[in-house]
Image: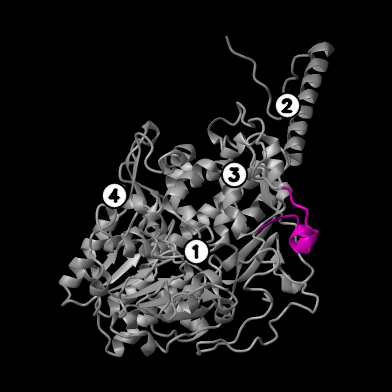
């Protein structure tokens, strides 16, 4: 049957007519759909940039930038950084090793490096289940990756037994051996690497350089008891002398390594079993010179603040800016409490408590550095005594000035008040009261939790502490720690060095309670930086009460209007290398050991070489080649040149004798000590 066809040009057939109800229904649905689409578009437009978005963006940008810079660094020629630096700053001077090699200097005396606290690497040999997979991996030094990945496990393994000061059960952490133990503290952050590289330029190699690595956490004598470290140092020095035509070694201790080597010199000559049995002439036969870099011979006030409140200047600023991060339970970590619990098990921290009491460090009304003005720098002096004051005095006719002898003061008003107006209540016999610890403290318990509110208040009521009362304070707040410390260290001044009690090893690292070896041909150098504000005394306040808290903190709001007082951010500063004050680094060579004294009966020659701090001129210089900072000085070209010349055979006189920028000789003369 044929279908009818539409004629060309005819209109299309009309759609079937729907009822009005269906049309209205579809219209409402379309309207609702359009409204929802419009609302969705509007919500996308009005969406705010959240904090999480910002953090993710910043982290992503930092990571991408870092990866890109790392790629460029590895892709560029090795000479490119030097080319850029020279294009900006002009031609660079030759490194000391290159310069002295051109002068014809060659390796002669074997060199022994003695690292200081925290700069030597530590690795895991045995641990708990949380440390699986970390056998012989560095827990200290390197990238510190385990600190970020498993912080509580890291703290557990870096802590020592609170009773013995040795390994806790089931844990063995040991020092890394070889030059790599302390060449770099972390990737890109050198300690000994620059000095080692420059020594290699004149012919030194591993057989003529020895890194005397040790576990810097445990007491000096315990390094021998547990690891036989002192015996290893003795045998290595003997081997190096025997295999280098009898040339004696040049020993280069850094920081706390200076105290450790003082202990070694007494140990090696003392009879067994307490000592190494080398005899009274061992040092004279094996040592040419001791070049101490930044040695804290008389201790550092920084150690007091670290033990008292787990703080130093930088930590105090961070604690005041972000107290919730350091003081409270953030992400399950009470940061400062963990730091305090861990560091109070490290017995070597007690080796740097100030020695000599008020005689050396001053009392409520006097200190050797009285009159020091932080705003002025000294001019260079090559003489034994420094140049004139150059307007450096700050005390007026009424005697107003900074009281550096008050190492801890509770309140700025107490720090500045005349001693006659300070009302003090003795804390020594105070009742400690109820235990503060509770279930929330758990594994962050510290000895403060055994003191109670009355004990804490008694400390603040004493108001001010000098070097003479600091020991009583630490015995009161940390009795377990100080009990271990009393067995290994002493902080006084010997009345009679012939007293047999001074044959005990607890006195060997205190230069004021022991004699240097009978070796008149040995030269002792004190090399350290100056021109950097260095912590000397602190203004404290009570912390706000909280669970698991450290009850005291540096008062960062305490500042002085008197520019001569050197008070800034709750810290009184004096001249030094940012860690060790000039007085501690220089006094023994300036006076205590100078000539024949009861501390230096054979008259070893002493020399002071100060390095005036100059920060890097630009970022391309890295940490600088003229730095006087405590660790950065290890890359100071002038210091490296002095070390290389002595290692190649020069004497202290060949270097030009003393080079002094500070007031160390004047300050030393103010100390009334029987020599």
> Given this view, does label 2 or label 4 mark the residue nearer the observer?
4
Q: Earlier in the sequence, mark 2 or mark 1?
A: 2
Relative to 301, residue 50 above or below: above
User: Cα distance, mark 1 to mark 4?
Assistant: 30 Å
User: Cα distance, mark 2 to mark 4?
Assistant: 109 Å
User: Cα distance, mark 2 to mark 3?
Assistant: 111 Å
> Given this view, does label 4 or label 3 mark the residue nearer the observer?
3
Bounds of the magenta span?
408-425
Residue that carries the numbered disc 1 in the rendered image: 493
Left or right, 38 with reference to 235: right
Residue nearest the observer in this picture, 92 or 98: 98
The x, y position of residue 421, in whole percent, is: 80, 59
Q: What residue sits 23% from the left and 71% below the top? A: 208
The secondary structure type at the circle numbered 2 is loop
Q: Quadrant of residue 479?
A: top right
Residue that carries the numbered disc 4 in the rendered image: 227
Q: What residue sits 20% from the left and 72% below the top? A: 241
């Amino acid at each position: 049957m044929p279908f009818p066809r539409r004629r060309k040009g005819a209109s299309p057939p009309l759609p079937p007519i729907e009822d009005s109800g269906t049309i209205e229904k579809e219209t409402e649905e379309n309207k609702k759909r359009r409204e929802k689409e419009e609302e969705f578009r509007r919500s996308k437009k009005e969406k705010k940039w959240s904090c999480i978005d910002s953090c993710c963006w910043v982290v992503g940008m930092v990571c991408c930038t870092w990866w890109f810079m790392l790629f460029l660094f590895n892709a560029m020629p090795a000479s490119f950084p030097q080319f850029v630096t020279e294009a900006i700053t002009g031609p660079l001077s030759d490194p000391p090793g290159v310069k002295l090699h051109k002068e014809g200097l060659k390796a002669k005396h074997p060199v022994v490096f003695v690292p200081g606290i925290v700069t030597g690497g530590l690795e895991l040999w045995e641990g708990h289940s949380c440390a699986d997979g970390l056998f012989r991996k560095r827990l200290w030094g390197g990238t510190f990756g385990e600190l970020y990945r498993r912080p509580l496990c890291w703290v557990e393994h870096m802590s020592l037994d609170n009773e013995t000061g040795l390994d806790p059960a089931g844990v063995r952490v040991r020092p890394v051996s070889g030059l790599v133990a302390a060449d770099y503290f972390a990737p890109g952050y050198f300690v000994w690497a620059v000095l080692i590289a420059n020594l290699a330029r004149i012919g030194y190699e591993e057989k003529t350089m020895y890194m005397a690595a040790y576990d810097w956490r445990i007491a000096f004598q315990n390094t021998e008891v547990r690891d036989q470290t002192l015996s290893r140092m003795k045998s290595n020095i003997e081997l190096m002398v025997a295999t280098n035509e009898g040339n004696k070694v040049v020993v280069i201790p850094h920081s706390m390594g200076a105290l450790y080597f003082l202990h070694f010199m007494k140990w090696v000559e003392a009879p067994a079993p307490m000592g190494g049995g080398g005899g009274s002439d061992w040092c004279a036969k094996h040592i040419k010179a001791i070049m101490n870099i930044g040695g804290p011979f008389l201790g550092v006030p920084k150690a007091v603040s670290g033990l008292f409140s787990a703080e130093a200047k930088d930590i105090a600023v961070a604690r005041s800016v972000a107290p919730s991060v350091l003081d409270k339970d953030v992400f399950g970590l009470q940061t400062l409490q963990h730091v305090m619990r861990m560091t109070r098990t490290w017995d070597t921290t007690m080796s740097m408590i100030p020695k000599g009491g008020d005689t050396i460090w001053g009392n409520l009304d006097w200190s050797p550095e009285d009159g020091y003005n932080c705003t002025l720098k000294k001019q260079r002096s090559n003489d034994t005594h420094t140049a004139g004051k150059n307007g450096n005095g700050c005390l007026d006719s009424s005697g107003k000035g900074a009281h550096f002898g008050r190492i801890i003061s509770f309140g700025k008003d107490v720090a500045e008040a005349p001693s006659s107006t300070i009302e003090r209540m003795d804390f020594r016999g105070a009742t400690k009261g109820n235990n503060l610890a509770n279930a929330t403290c758990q594994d962050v318990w510290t000895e403060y939790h055994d003191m109670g509110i009355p004990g804490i208040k008694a400390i603040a009521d004493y108001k001010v502490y000098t070097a003479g009362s600091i020991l009583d304070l630490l015995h009161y707040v940390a009795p377990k720690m100080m009990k271990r410390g009393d067995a290994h260290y002493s902080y006084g001044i010997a009345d009679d060095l012939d007293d047999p009690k001074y044959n005990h090893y607890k006195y060997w690292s205190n230069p004021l309670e022991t004699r240097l070896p009978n070796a008149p041909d040995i030269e002792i150098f004190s090399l350290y930086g100056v021109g950097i504000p260095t912590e000397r005394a602190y203004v404290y306040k009570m912390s706000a009460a909280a669970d698991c808290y450290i009850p005291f903190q540096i008062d960062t709001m305490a500042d002085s209007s008197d520019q001569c007082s050197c008070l800034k951010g709750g810290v009184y500063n004096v001249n030094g290398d940012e860690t060790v004050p000039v007085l501690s680094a220089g006094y023994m060579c300036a006076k205590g050991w100078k000539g024949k004294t009861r501390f230096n009966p054979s008259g070893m020659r002493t020399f002071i070489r100060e390095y005036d701090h100059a920060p890097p001129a630009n970022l391309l210089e890295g940490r600088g080649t003229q730095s006087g900072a405590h660790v950065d000085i290890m890359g100071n070209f002038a210091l490296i040149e002095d070390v290389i010349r002595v290692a190649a055979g020069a004497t202290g006189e060949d270097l030009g004798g003393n080079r002094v920028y500070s007031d160390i000789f004047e300050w030393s003369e103010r100390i009334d000590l029987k020599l």
